[in-house]
Amino acid sequence: MKKILIGLVLVVLIFTGCSGGNSQKGSETSEKAENQSAQKLSKLPSFELKDLDGEIYTEESFKNKVLLIDFWATWCPPCRKEIPGFINLYKKYKDKGLEVIGISLDEDINKLESFVEEEQINYTVLIGNKEVAQAFGGIQGIPTTFIVDRDGNVVFKQVGLASEKKFEQQIKKVLDK
């Protein structure tokens, strides 16, 4: 029964967010919808998650930082495609107050650890769960990425694949405030 449920979840994810993300066609409409979604989730929700070393992080761990929070998994091709951009953005803006947080929805922690090491991910990777996905408004597909300002306001939401440039534009808006 568990395998059937996991299979159904995978099918849903593949046909929603993990199918390659937003196309350029209709991007103005999807951008409006994303910003409306960001407004619905107006504040960074409370969470308590562990990283790969077992250290516990909460929303308070990132107080007064600009956050790029990405829900992703190692088995999701669009998620994997975004990671080099997140690595670059973190290198470029960490000294200005940016924190990048990857919330993994993987079940196989060993595979996750290997992937993080192989890809040389330089930002915080946390192990996600259903509760945190619900707290963020119910993650419907991955990748799903949020940008949160220093006051804990969710200012941007992207469902599906997006370019490093698009995320950088959104980050600069809040870093410069």
Image: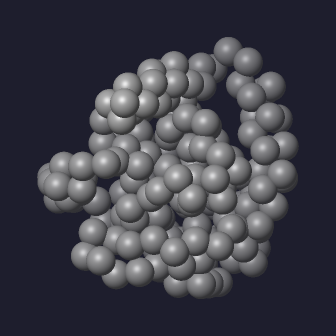
The residue sitting at 24% across, 56% down in the picture is 109
- Residue 18 visible in the snapshot: no
Nearest the viewer among 173 and 60 is: 60
Nearest the viewer among 53 and 153 is: 53
Q: Position of residue 23 (x, y in %)?
A: 59, 20
Please give left or right for residue 98 compared with residue 31 in the image: left
Q: Residue furthest top?
A: 25
Nearest the viewer among 177 and 15 is: 15
Which of the 4 quarters of the picture holds residue 46? bottom right
Position of 53 relative to 81 (above/below): below
- Residue 118 visible in the snapshot: yes
Which of the 4 quarters of the picture holds residue 155? bottom right
Quarter that holds the N terminus: top left
Tally of numbered tags:
0
Q: Position of residue 43 (x, y in %)?
A: 77, 67
Nearest the viewer among 75 and 116 is: 75
Position of 32 relative to 61 (above/below): above
Q: Position of residue 33 (x, y in %)?
A: 80, 34
Please give left or right for residue 98 compared with residue 37 in the image: left
Quarter that holds the C terminus: bottom right
Q: Position of residue 165 (x, y in %)?
A: 54, 44
The residue sitting at 68% across, 68% down in the picture is 45
The residue sitting at 71% across, 25% down in the picture is 27
